[in-house]
Each structure stands twice: as C-alpha cells, then as structure tokens.
Image (cartoon, grey):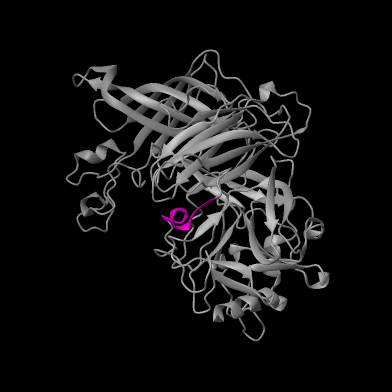
C-alpha cells in the first residue's frame, strides 16, 4: 500500500529529523523522586508498536541496552502542533519537524532519541524469535493526544492506551466513542511484521483494507493507527489533569485533580492512592471534593477508593492536601501514585480506561512567614441595609437570597494587605525541569516564554482597579477590622452608569462631542445640562474571627464577617451588604510584580 512506503521513508530517513524533534525528547530532566510505576511491555518478533506511559530514568542507550531490539522509534504527536516555516532555510525550503525520534543500536551516531518520555508510542524492531516481556520503572503521565488531520500523505495518529488491571481488551468503537477526530467505524490499523521481515501497516483484527470498529479491539499497552478527520485535543475517554501529577515541593499544601468524561456514555470512575514502585515513602494525604456543599469544609484522609459516576462532559474536581504539620522535616523525597480508572464493566460503553499520575513532595517544614501570600476570600452575603425613610436606615436586614462573592487579598513580606481585582500566576521552567511561579499584578504582563500562566480575578471589583493597600487593620487580626476603600470613576468601564452602546450614557452633551459637566461636583446639578456619570465609592471590611488560622495545614484558612459598602448609588446614604466569609491561602509568594 502506498501509505506504507511513505511511513517507511519517515521512519528510516533520519536526515529529516531536525533539532526541533530532538528537543522534544532529548535532554529532559526526568525525576524519579515523584511517585513511580512499573510497567511491563511485550516486545514481539519483528515490527510492533507499544505504548509506554512512564518516563524511565536514564538515557535511551541505558534503557534499551537489555531490550531485544535493534531499532526503536519514539512517536511524539507534539510535532503536529508546530507549524512548518515556509521560509525556514536559506533557500526558502520548508522546515520539517518529524514526529519520530530514532534510536539504532548499530548506528549510535545517527540516533536522535536521547531520553524516553512518558506517554509515548514506540515502534520497535524486535530481534527475538518469541515475544519477550520487559519492565520499565518511571514517573507516569496521563495521556495527551495531539490529533492531526490525515492528508494526502495518509499520515496516521498513533494512539496508545492504558486499560484497567485485569482487562484483556476492549472494543475500539467504545474507546473512541466521543472523539471528534475519529469518523464512525474507523478504520483502525496496527504496525506489524510481514512475511519478508519488512514493516507493514495492516487493519486491526487482521486483513488489509478498511476495518470496521465493531471488530477492532485494543489491549493494555497496545497501539492503534487512526486516520484523523480533524484537529482536536481529545485525550481518551477520561481527561485527567494535571497530566504529570502533583508536586508539592518543599512548601506546597493543596493541589487539585480534575477528571472529565470525554466519552459518549456515563462512566463509573474511581481514584485510589497507592505506594510508589520506586520505594519512596508515601506521604499521608487528605482530600475534599470541591463541589461539596461547603467548599471550604473539612478534609478526610485519602485512605479509601473514591468513586463518582460522571455523565458525558462532566468534570470531577478533588482537592488533594498535604498536612505538613505531620512531617518530620528530614528533607527526604516522598512519593505516591494516584490511580484513576473506569471501574464498572456492566455500564454501557465501558472502555476500561486507566491512568496513573505521580505524587511527590519534600519532607520539609517551610519557613515562609504567616500570613504572607495570596488569599482567596469567598463570602455569602445574606443581609443588606434598608432605607425605611429618607432619614432612617436599618442595617443587617435579612436578604431574600444569598449572593456569593469572591475576591483576592495579597499580604506582602511586611504584613501589608492589598486588595487586588486580578493577578496572573506565571510559571518559568528551569533547565532541571523545576517551575518557579511568579505573581503579576493587574497592570503587569508576564514575559513571553513562560511554562504556563493562569489568571485569578474577581467579578465584583472594577476591572481597571490597581492594587489597593488596606486603610485600616491587619490581615488576620481579630482585634482590628481590615478595611479597604476604592473608587469606581465616572469613566471606568465598571461604572454602573457607563453604558458602552447607549448614546445618552456617553458623558457627552447633546452634540455627542463636548464633555458633560463633572458629576462629582454637586453644583453642576443645578444647571440645565446635568452630569451623566459620577464616581461610585466602595469599601470592603473584613472582621476576622478570634483564634485565627494554623500555618502549613490544609485547613490554612481564616473566617469572619464581611461588610461591603457602596456610596453614591442612592442619595439617602450608603448601601451595605454583610455575610460570613472564609479566606484560604492559595499562593505563598510575598512579592507581586507590578
């Protein structure tokens, strides 16, 4: 078949493997101090493809030294996320980034595979006469698939799978149900050895040509070659985040695991906490399901198997916490493994999906000062002020419902508290693979080239508000309420009297060009042309409960009563809303880049 010839060209002609492909695989710092998993794979005689879900320690030369293979090609779908530069060379030729990096025992000088990453498909040429099982120890990763659309070259998506323990095989039709890149019944292919010892691609289940999904099956560690109909990020029946596990480092206490059902049917999902196969001590963890009624509620020990039935598209979020007050502070590396799988074969569309992610931490008691860092404040406003007459106002009247609000407060190294509308958390990666997180304020922009970034923001504060320092009190001090004041200017996009599309709320005179009178000057309201907008005042007051919080525990939180005050929205006086709040430290950075 013609596609086979093109496949062999890609696999054998190492001249097209440019440095970009090597950078995807070689020279990465792989850390076994994270929770490790042992995976057994089978090397068949001749050509075969296997899926490796762990990243072993050591170079490719060291890993493959005892394998009965003379060549291994590692497939990285990341290559399809890179757009070829049409002006890449001096003569204007395309810059080609191959999806394969190659290791060859007899030709080490032409090998381009430096280290083996987790979540990788390997195409091996076995020199053995019978199937041989080999074992790999390494840090696991959840699957990610960069689906690309098949073109006139008939390039395939190499998809490897992990299945639940004890499951021999599942139908490909069930496994890929819900994937937008797979059309109907396939087809699905596999890599195999032909009678003349050459490499070939045949339809899954035997025979050449189109093979229907109803007959194609896949086993644990197996690989299917699937033509893609479109680009997508579908990574399997379940999408697990974070893919590389939980790294608490030397000072982290809380992280979140999310599992999303990307399949076409409801799935019975289990999460269990296991020992690391690398021999590390497993740290005691706590958990709390973040969609519980009390999002700041109590923690339970992660000693049992967690279970949830997820409908299609649903996400299960579980907060995982490390209580550092129980650690010895020896500085030793700790590790465990979270095992996630679909666990009920009786349910329709059962796929037996399984994935492992590592848990790592350093046995340390950090010295970061309390309470410096970024705090997330969540409140439920349940009482408001009532203007019974032009001269009388009554506070703390029970409201008809509860209004949830969320905002952030940063405490610097000097103990000063700042109210922030938004902050960006950006991570910069070092050469050893570690990531340093930096906080950027509302007027700062993270530099290019960061490993990742995410924005934390509040919808109840004006979007053009800078960082506002507290005007009274001390964060966490029950003896003096912590107060912030801010203003929503007449031209602020958050001003309630600023209508972006209505011409009568543009703060202009009737010619729609000349500015209207200043609304903050009371004498302007006696003229024939009235102001259209004016400044709204805001105040946030946090009355902390006595007793405070405990540093370095997952329950690292404070509580109290919140008062939110608006001035300028009615002529009789301010509007006040009150409710209970909880504050949880989410970042420990004492500095915010401005």
Report the span colored magenta.
169-178
Residue 142 % position (x, y): 58, 48
Q: Position of residue 208 (x, y in %)?
A: 52, 73
Residue toward you, 98 or 373: 98
Picture coordinates of residue 236, whole percent (x, y): 50, 52
Quadrant (top left/top right/bottom left/bottom right) for the C terminus: top right
Tell which residue pokes out farthest to the bottom in this image: 91
Is residue 366 shown above or below 225?
Answer: above
Q: Is residue 382 left or right of residue 19?
A: left
Q: Is residue 265 above or below residue 403?
A: below
- Relative to 119, is 104 above or below? below
**Total labels drawn:** 0
Q: Nearer the viewer, residue 553 or 36?
A: 36
Asked if one can make out residue 594 in the rendered structure from this viewpoint, the answer is no
Q: Quadrant of residue 47?
A: bottom right
The quarter of the image holding the N terminus is: bottom right
Q: Please say whether residue 266 is visible from this viewpoint.
A: yes
User: Could you tell me which residue is drawn at 43 percent across and 25 percent down?
Assistant: 294
Which residue: 55% across, 71% down?
Answer: 202
Please give the name of the residue rendered at 37% of the width and 22% of the height, measured from the top-left corner.
579
| Left or right: 591, with 379 as reference point | right
Name the residue furthest left: 528
Q: Is residue 173 magenta?
A: yes
Let me know if residue 121 is in the magenta part.
no
Q: Write the residue at 52% across / 64% down.
A: 205
Toward which corner of the image does residue 518 lie, by quadrant? top left
In-front residue for pair 219/285: 219
């Amino acid at each position: 078949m013609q596609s086979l010839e093109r496949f062999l060209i890609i696999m054998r002609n190492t001249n097209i493997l440019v440095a970009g492909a090597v950078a995807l695989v070689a020279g990465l710092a792989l850390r076994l101090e994270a929770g490790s998993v042992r995976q057994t794979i089978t090397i068949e005689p001749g050509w075969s493809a296997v899926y490796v879900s762990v990243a072993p320690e050591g170079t490719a030369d060291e890993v493959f030294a005892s394998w009965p293979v003379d060549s291994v090609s590692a497939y990285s779908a990341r290559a399809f996320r890179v757009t070829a530069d049409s002006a890449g060379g001096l003569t204007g030729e395309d810059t080609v980034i191959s999806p394969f990096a190659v290791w060859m025992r007899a030709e080490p000088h032409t090998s381009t595979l430096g280290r083996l990453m987790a979540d990788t498909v390997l195409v091996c040429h076995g020199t053995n006469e019978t199937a041989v099982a080999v074992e790999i120890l390494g840090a696991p990763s959840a699957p990610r698939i960069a689906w690309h659309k098949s073109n006139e070259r008939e390039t395939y998506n190499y998809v490897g799978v992990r299945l639940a323990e004890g499951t021999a095989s599942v139908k490909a039709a069930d496994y890929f149900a819900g994937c937008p890149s797979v059309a109907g019944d396939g087809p699905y292919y596999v890599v195999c050895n032909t009678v003349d010892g050459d490499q070939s691609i045949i339809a899954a289940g035997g025979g050449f040509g189109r093979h229907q999904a109803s007959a194609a099956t896949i086993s644990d560690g197996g690989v299917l070659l699937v033509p893609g109909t479109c680009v997508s990020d579908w990574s399997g029946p379940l999408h697990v985040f974070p893919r590389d596990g939980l790294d608490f480092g030397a000072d982290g206490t809380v992280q979140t695991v999310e599992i999303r059902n990307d399949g076409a049917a409801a799935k019975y999902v289990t999460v269990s906490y296991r020992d690391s196969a690398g021999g590390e001590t497993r740290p005691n963890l706590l958990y709390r399901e973040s969609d519980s009624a009390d999002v700041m509620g109590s923690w339970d020990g992660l000693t049992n198997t967690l279970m949830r039935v997820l409908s299609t598209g649903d996400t299960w979020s579980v907060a995982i916490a490390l209580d550092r007050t129980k650690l010895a502070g020896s500085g030793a590396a700790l590790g465990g493994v979270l095992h996630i799988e679909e666990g009920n074969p009786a349910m329709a569309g059962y796929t037996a999906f399984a994935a492992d992610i590592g848990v790592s931490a350093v046995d340390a008691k950090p010295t970061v000062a309390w309470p410096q860092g970024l705090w997330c404040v969540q409140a439920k406003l349940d009482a408001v002020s009532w203007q019974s007459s032009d001269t009388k106002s009554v506070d703390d009247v029970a409201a008809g419902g509860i209004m949830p609000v969320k905002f952030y407060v940063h405490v610097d190294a000097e103990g000063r508290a700042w109210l922030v509308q938004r902050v960006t958390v950006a991570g910069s990666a070092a050469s050893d693979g570690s990531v340093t997180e930096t906080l950027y304020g509302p007027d700062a922009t993270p530099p290019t080239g960061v490993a990742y970034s995410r924005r934390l923001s509040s919808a109840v504060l004006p979007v053009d508000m800078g960082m506002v320092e507290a005007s009274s009190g001390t964060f966490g001090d029950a003896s003096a309420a912590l107060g912030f004041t801010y203003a929503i200017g007449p031209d602020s996009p958050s001003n309630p009297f600023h209508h972006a599309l209505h011409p009568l709320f543009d703060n202009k005179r009737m010619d729609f060009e000349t500015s209207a009178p200043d609304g903050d000057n009371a004498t302007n309201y006696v003229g024939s042309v009235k102001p259209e907008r004016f400044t709204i005042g805001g105040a946030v007051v946090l009355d902390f409960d006595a007793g405070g919080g405990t540093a370095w525990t997952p329950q690292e939180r404070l509580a109290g009563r919140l008062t939110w005050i608006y001035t300028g929205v009615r002529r009789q006086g301010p509007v006040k809303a009150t409710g209970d709040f909880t504050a949880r430290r989410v970042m420990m950075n004492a500095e915010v880049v401005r």
